[in-house]
Amino acid sequence: MDFYVGIRHHGASPIHPIPGEDMNKPVTQRELGANEGAAAIRARYRRDDSPTPPVWNETLDLLLAHRSVRAYLPESVPASVVETMVAAAQSASTSSNLQVWSVVAVEDEVRKSRLADLAGNQQHIRDAPLFLLWLADLSRLDNIGKDQGRDAAALPFLEMFLTAAVDAALAAQNGLVALESLGYGGVYIGGIRNKPEEVAAELDLPPGTFAVFGMAVGRPDPAKAGGVRPRLGQGAVLHREQYAWNDAQREAVATYDEKFRDFQKECGLPEQGWIRQALSRVRGPESLSGRDRLSEVLRKLGFGLK
């Protein structure tokens, strides 16, 4: 029997019939060589004991090849690409189907420059033809409740802000993967949280909305392509049954520190390794670039956080 997307009325033709075997399939089922998959995973970890995939396909190949893109060709991103990206973003999972996120697409050069200043003077925001602001958005449900004359008294609770932030992150990652599949690239901009009140004013955000992060997007400049950044070995992040800080984690961290130092050297960056860099980033409130006051700011922006 067939499975269907949408509502099928009794006696009517099915809406968008989809064979059951095609549900949740990758963009392509074309399998690539096993050696190609193993090489892609090894490139991500730089470890001889990297996992071996049971099969490999173009979906996995795209995901494992991800890298941040900060240099772009001087060409705009067509509206059709943006709209396709949003469709992919809206296909991500969303808690209780609340869809408590939105995205603001900014192409105006002057506005991008002001946002770049607010995010720590990041030049690639100015260089990117498109800058996306991904929002936790409880305002829409609040407005719907008012229009319908119904209570939305759960919105001021911390759970709802967390739900909105998670929804925005899931949507954004789907969107970025879609962009990469279309030949574009991007980089997340956490610095947009440095001055959230000013960002909200720049984007005319209503109460109950917050820019969780930005994303600079464009066609990658092949002359300035970056490498695949290594990640912690799975011994550091994969736990079986219960969490454990043990020798396997310590080994994964120590090995990664060496691999990351090699990556920094290849990129012409200071060779400080990952441990020093990560601990420097969390050394104290002063290392948070103003984000240490986020709970205070969020309340000013209309989030109850009860």
Image: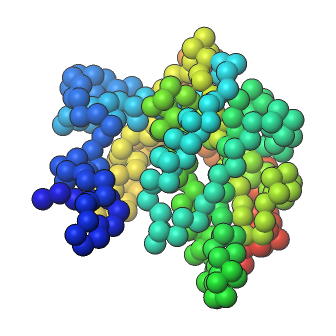
Residue 23 is left or right of residue 288, and the answer is: left
x and y percent of residue 239 in the render?
A: 33, 56
Task: Specify the farthest residue to the top.
Answer: 223
x and y percent of residue 149 in the render?
A: 67, 88
Which residue: 27% across, 22% down?
36
Q: Hey, which quadrant is residue 160 in on the image?
A: bottom right
In this view of the protein, can residue 261 be seen by the observer?
Answer: no
Which residue: 59% across, 39% down?
82
Which residue: 24% across, 25% down?
32
* 61 w.r.t. 241: above or below: above
**Residue nearest the observer in this picture, 275 or 293:** 293
In this view of the protein, can residue 34 be seen by the observer?
Answer: yes
x and y percent of residue 106 in the render?
A: 74, 41
Q: Hey, which quadrant is residue 306 in on the image?
A: bottom right
Residue 82 is left or right of residue 127, and the answer is: left
Residue 270 is left or right of residue 159, and the answer is: right
Task: Specify the farthest residue to the left.
Answer: 1
Q: Exactly how many numbered labels are in the figure?
A: 0
x and y percent of residue 62 in the render?
A: 40, 31
* 143 w.r.t. 90: above or below: below
Which residue: 70% across, 19% down?
74
Task: Specify the farthest residue to the front.
Answer: 11
Question: Which quarter of the figure is the N terminus placed in?
Answer: bottom left
